Image (cartoon, rainbow, N blue to C red):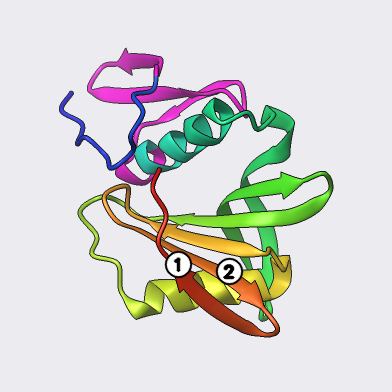
Amino acid sequence: MELPKLNFNTQFDFKFRQDKDKFFIYDVLRKSYLLLTPEEWVRQHWVHYYLSIGKAASSLIAEKKVRVEKTTKRIDLLVLDKIEADILIECKAPQIKLKPEHFEQIARYNSVIQAKEIILSNGLQHIFAKYQEGQYYFYPKEL
């Protein structure tokens, strides 16, 4: 199993399992093994990143269903601050180049979630934006 090294300053300790030709990664939030897709590889890095900086597992919500413009969507990861939406994260596979339409996607999701910040990430590139007074402000950040 060859996995790309992602752009995080910390190495994380993941648990893997193989069943025939499929690989699975243990998700500490859902307490189960999930199919190891490229997007899941990125999501698990974000989960472990937030746990490593002291966020409680109970403050992280993965793949929550939300209604956006008459359709049901799933957000990749939501970080709560107490009970308020703090950071909404949209994960793409590492081989996907981040484009404006990906940012528009997470912004649509955030029109429902109302998180203070959003992160669009393919694991190699991360785009950070704060939402204030109806606008997004981009900023750099080191992980």
Question: 35 above or below 102?
Answer: above
- Do callouts 2 and 1 mark residues in contact (Cβ within 8 Å)? yes
Q: Label 2 amino acid?
A: Lys
Confirm whether the magenta stretch covers residue 22: yes
Q: Horizontal placement of 74 versus 95: left or right?
A: right
Q: Position of residue 26 (x, y in %)?
A: 47, 21
**Foreground of the two, 31 or 21:** 31
Tag 1 secondary structure: strand
Residue named by callout 1:
139
Residue beneath label 2, please? 130
**Where on the picture, by quarter, is residue 113?**
bottom right
Q: Is residue 70 visible?
A: yes
The quarter of the picture where residue 85 lies is: bottom right
Residue at (57, 23) in percent of width and height: 28
Spatial CA span between label 2 and label 1 = 8 Å
Q: Is residue 25 magenta?
A: yes
**Residue at 72% from the left image edge and 68% from the top image edge:** 114
Return the x and y of residue 13 as percentages of the image width and height: 39, 16
Magenta span: 13-40
Residue 71 visible at all: no
Task: Quarter of the image for the C terminus: give it.
Answer: top left
